[in-house]
Image (tube, helix red, strand yellow):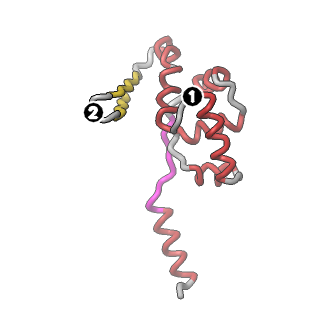
Amino acid sequence: MATDEQFDIVNQKEETFRDEPTAAILDEKEWSYLKRFYDMSPRELQIAQLVCCGYTNGDIAGKLNIRSGTVKTHLRSIFGKTRTRNRVSMLVKYIEKVQHIRENNGSTYTVKAVNSHKSGDSEQIQLFE
């Protein structure tokens, strides 16, 4: 039978193994634009921001003090509004939508999304800085 000390050691290893995501791909002005463009609720916006920073559904649920099922429900709504099916395509769509804002501000980010039907319907996504 496992002791409390053994559980503490396992929990400590998990905490040190997994760092909290810190990437911020879009700024507040861009998020504001996306919120209006896709008619997202404030909670959907929060969840979209956390997803785009790399958080899992469980991480988001813990951070926002909601159930992971609620996160999934919000994600389904976001996917419907953005006409996407997964997190990566949602992020790429967001970046493509804010591209004109970045071009006007002098940023040099570009996104290429290539669907190659000849190579087994694989999707390649490249982000350049």
Give the alpha-carbon distance from disc 1 to disc 2, as whole Å. Answer: 24 Å
Q: Is residue 4 left or right of residue 118?
A: right
Q: Residue at x 60, y 37 (%)?
A: 48
In-front residue for pair 19/61: 61
Q: Residue at x 50, y 44 (%)?
A: 54
Q: Residue at x 58, y 52 (%)?
A: 59
Dot label at residue 113: none
Nearest-to-viewer mark from 1 and 2: 2
Q: Earlier in the sequence, mark 1 or mark 2?
A: 1
In terms of secondary structure, where does tag 1 sit? loop
Most frequent secondary structure within the magenta stretch: loop
Dot label at residue 83: 1
Return the residue found at the far bottom. 1
Q: Position of residue 86 (x, y in %)?
A: 51, 38
Q: Position of residue 79 (x, y in %)?
A: 59, 34
- The verdict on residue 69 being magenta is no
Q: Which residues are magenta?
A: 16-24
71 vs 81: above or below: below
In-front residue for pair 25/77: 77
Q: Which residue is mark 2?
A: 119
Dot 1 and dot 2 residues touching (CB under 8 Å): no
Q: Is residue 129 visible?
A: no
124 vs 62: above or below: above
How many numbered badges does the structure rendering display?
2
